[in-house]
């Protein structure tokens, strides 16, 4: 290998080691660059052996293995979290660095151009329970915080009914920017699979830093973005695993705002009871009987 190649490799390794020291565990790799790495290099032009002197065989140099973050065709192929569990100041610093990167992200130019705020996430970075929604709405885009509209207010009530406060859990979305709605003065739209795939590495880093004991996916779109599965009616109430963490899918709070049936409220609450049991939280008789017919 040429000296230029070795110098470039050494610089790359030093850069990655510097990122690792700051708590960064994932590096985005563009598809075209990843494809270029897998191509077979074109063999060099043949030079008559008599015209050159064979170079000395270099001694093998041991280098640290740098594992690139692979691209996956479906969310279900994403590996479990790896690496050391960060705590204390190291965790705070890593989370701050992640937030800084997310706040200036322009990977989706159309979303970056239309957003008012990047909606990174909110809550306790040491939380045992983490809620994941699909994308910010108009209220969230305006305030820069997830779940602050009517659906968010209902989520806060659900959390409080579980015996927790909003600042004891962590709340995030797959998409950190509100999906743009060209030509519309109001309303929201569902994020596309491409948008979610582009943005989800930020969520993966959040999950891997927080290491919650339980994840709750809020709504069918969130479930589709996380596991690539559709049909929230059939999926809710059944435990799944995501990045080696138990995942409970349930209805989005906005669904309950439009469907006030006691039976639907009870289904969501049963999912929350399941999350509480998985966390080993105490459940009193009043909590067990919420939204049951008299």
Image (spheres, grey):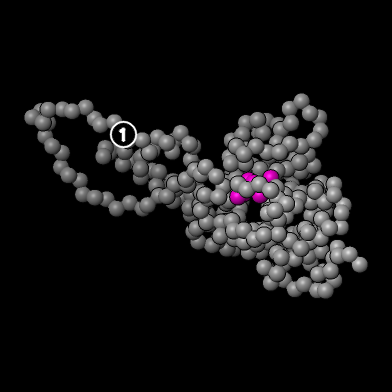
Q: Residue furthest top?
A: 183
Please give the residue where the numbered disc 1 appears in the rendered image.
Answer: 41
Q: Quadrant of the C terminus?
A: bottom right
Q: Residue furthest right?
A: 294
Q: Is residue 228 visible?
A: yes
- Say above or below: 280 vs 144: below
Q: Is residue 222 magenta?
A: yes
Seen from the viewer's position, the closer of residues 76 and 66 is 76
The location of residue 206, given as percent across then percent down, is 61, 53
Seen from the viewer's position, the closer of residues 267 and 253 is 267
Identity of the residue drawn at 18% across and 28% down: 46
Tell whether 22 sits left or right of 165.
Answer: left
The chief SS type of the magenta part is helix
Q: Is residue 171 visible?
A: no
Identity of the residue drawn at 61% across and 34% down: 108
The location of residue 123, given as percent across then percent down, is 71, 56
Identity of the residue drawn at 32% across and 35% down: 40
Tell whether 70 sits left or right of 286.
Answer: left
Seen from the viewer's position, the closer of residues 104 and 241 is 241
- Say above or below: 280 vs 192: below
Callout count: 1
Q: Quadrant of the N terminus?
A: top left
Q: In this picture, which residue range is highlighted in magenta?
A: 221-227
The location of residue 92, given as percent across then percent down, is 61, 57
Tell whether 99 sits left or right of 24.
Answer: right
The location of residue 105, given as percent across then percent down, is 61, 38
Residue 107 figure quarter: top right
Identity of the residue drawn at 44% across and 46% down: 68
Q: Is residue 64 magenta?
A: no
Q: Residue furthest left?
A: 50
SS class of the residue under badge 1? loop
């Amino acid at each position: 290998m040429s000296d230029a190649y070795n110098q470039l490799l050494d610089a790359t390794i030093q850069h990655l080691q510097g990122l690792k020291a700051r708590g960064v565990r994932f590096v985005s790799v563009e598809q075209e660059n990843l494809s270029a790495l897998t191509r077979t290099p074109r063999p060099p032009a043949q030079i008559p052996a008599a015209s050159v002197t064979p170079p000395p065989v270099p001694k093998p140099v041991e280098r640290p293995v740098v594992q690139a973050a692979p691209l996956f065709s479906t969310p279900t192929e994403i590996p479990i979290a790896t690496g050391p569990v960060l705590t204390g100041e190291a965790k705070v610093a890593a989370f701050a660095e992640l937030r800084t990167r997310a706040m200036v992200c322009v990977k989706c130019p159309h979303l970056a151009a239309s957003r008012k705020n990047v909606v990174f996430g909110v809550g306790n970075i040491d939380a045992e329970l983490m809620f994941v929604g699909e994308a910010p709405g108009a209220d969230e885009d305006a305030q820069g915080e997830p779940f602050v509209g009517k659906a968010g207010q209902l989520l806060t009530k659900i959390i409080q009914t579980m015996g927790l406060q909003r600042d004891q859990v962590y709340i995030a979305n797959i998409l950190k920017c509100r999906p743009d709605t060209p030509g519309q003065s109001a309303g929201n739209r569902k994020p596309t699979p491409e948008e979610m795939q582009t943005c989800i590495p930020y969520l993966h880093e959040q999950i891997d830093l927080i290491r919650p004991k339980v994840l709750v996916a809020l709504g069918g779109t969130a479930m589709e973005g996380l596991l690539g599965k559709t049909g929230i009616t059939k999926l809710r109430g059944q435990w799944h695993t995501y990045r080696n963490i138990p995942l409970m899918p349930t209805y989005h709070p906005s669904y309950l705002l439009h469907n006030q049936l006691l039976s639907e409220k009870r289904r969501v609450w049963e999912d929350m009871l399941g999350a509480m049991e998985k966390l080993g939280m105490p459940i009193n008789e009043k909590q067990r009987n919420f939204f049951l017919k008299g």
